[in-house]
Amino acid sequence: MTAAARVIRGRILSFTENPATSGSPAHVLIDDGAVLVAAGKIEAVGEARDLIARAPPGAVVDDHSGSFIMPGFIDAHVHYPQTHVIGSYGAQLLDWLHNYTFVEEQKFANPEHCARIAAFFLDELIRSGTTTAMVYCTVHPESVDAFFTAAEARAMRMIAGKVMMDRDAPDGLRDTAEQGYDESKALIERWRGRGRLDYAITPRFAVTSSEAQLEAAGALKREFWNCYVQTHANENKAEIARVAALFPEARSYIDVYARAGLLGPRSVLGHCIHLQDSEVAALAESGAVAAFCPTSNLFLGSGLFDQARLERAGVRIALATDVGGGTSYSMLRTAAEGYKVLQLNGQSWPALEAFYQMTLGNARALSLDKRIGSIEPGKEADLIALDSRATPALAHRMETAGGDLEVELFALMTLGDDRAVRETYVAGEPLKR
Ligand SMILES: [Zn+2]
């Protein structure tokens, strides 16, 4: 992070509220605007000519006129060790884990492999305009050290954790309840709150964690109450049947986690597709977050996320790629597939709501909205320049957008990907190569 001030010029677009529930305009748009950043933070936002005039001498001006300047995207559920298995053919969840993921994750016993993949993964997020993510590592503590080292080198705000799994996985990928606890605790003490890093206690899911291990994860959560928790729930029908057989005393899949003390406002549960009413109620009551992973749910044939039902019940929702079950690092691609999933459920999703979700909505879901997710003085300067005319097809489509923001954003999310990201600023520094 350098101290040099920078003026980033473009069409400022930032949300102040959720457009789905706000009675008044929920966003700020400044057509010829600018953001003044210094020492990693946003100092001022306003009209370009005003900010350029008052910028300190020597400030760099990055002119992205015509492109949107938005907060960096946030991905609420993603697996960095799966960059080599994204796009692997022909399996549903449980086979996919055993045939592809668990084979790949064994390579993370090697710290050099961890470092190489962590660097690729973070650079790919930056190329896609994602500046913060909640990330699964593998069972190996080395995989967490490598990930946080790479995130720290880029000054990125990241949440991650060591996968805990003590059964139904190959030898090299199992810990024990006690080992999972000890290793997670040591990682929490080493990394949590260092720079922009935070930790998520990460039991993979109830199929691969014994009751003793889930209890150990719950004990960690009580000890480090402000830590995040991430896991998977109710993704696939065969998985749900397996959990019911493994935990006959639990009332439901979600109840398995509730009994272990793993539900709360800092808990993010991937998928949450096939839910009983009592499970929806338990999620809402606890403040836990359901992570909608549309490209993954379609790719693995898992099912259709019911956003309207969860919203009605007051469940907090996030949007996520779930790479490598998910098929794109791009939150634009993810939102586009999310729209199609909701269409299949008879629901809709205006682009303004989708862009809210990718930025401030996900920041709120991760309890990070005091720091990131919108463009306001004092917030961290994670910003992207997004060009809605980046490709011939986008430029052609914009000829008929008629200056309507909703039309423009919807076409951008439907046709856009990493090519639309002109620049990604992390703590004020341009990092897209
Ligand atoms: Zn996942």
Image (spheres, rainbow, N blue to C red):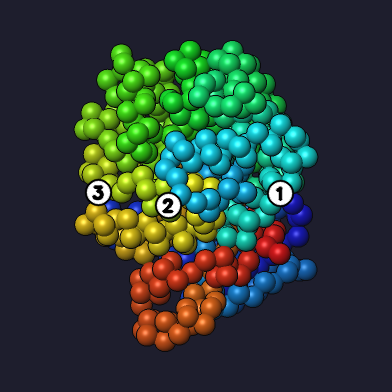
Q: Please give the residue where the numbered disc 1 appears in the rendered image.
A: 119
CB atoms of marks 2 and 3 within 8 Å: no
What residue is shown with label 2?
299
Look at label 2 and name its amino acid. Phe
- Visible residue check, residue 413: yes
Q: Quadrant of residue 135?
A: top right
From the viewer's side, name the closer residue of 40 and 84: 84
Crowding around mark 2 (Cα neighbors within 10 Å: few <14, some 14 to 19, many 20+) is some
Residue that badge 3 annotates: 308
- Residue at screen point 66% across, 29% down: 140
Which-is-in-front pick, marks 2 and 1?
Answer: 2
- Labelled pair 3, 1 in contact (Cβ < 8 Å): no
How much space separates mark 3 and mark 1, taking CA atoms?
Answer: 37 Å
Marks 2/1: CA distance? 25 Å
Say which amino acid is labelled 1.
Ala
Q: Nearer the viewer, mark 3 or mark 1?
A: 1
Q: Where residue 201 sits in the image (x, y, percent)?
A: 54, 27
Q: CA distance from mark 2 to mark 3?
A: 22 Å
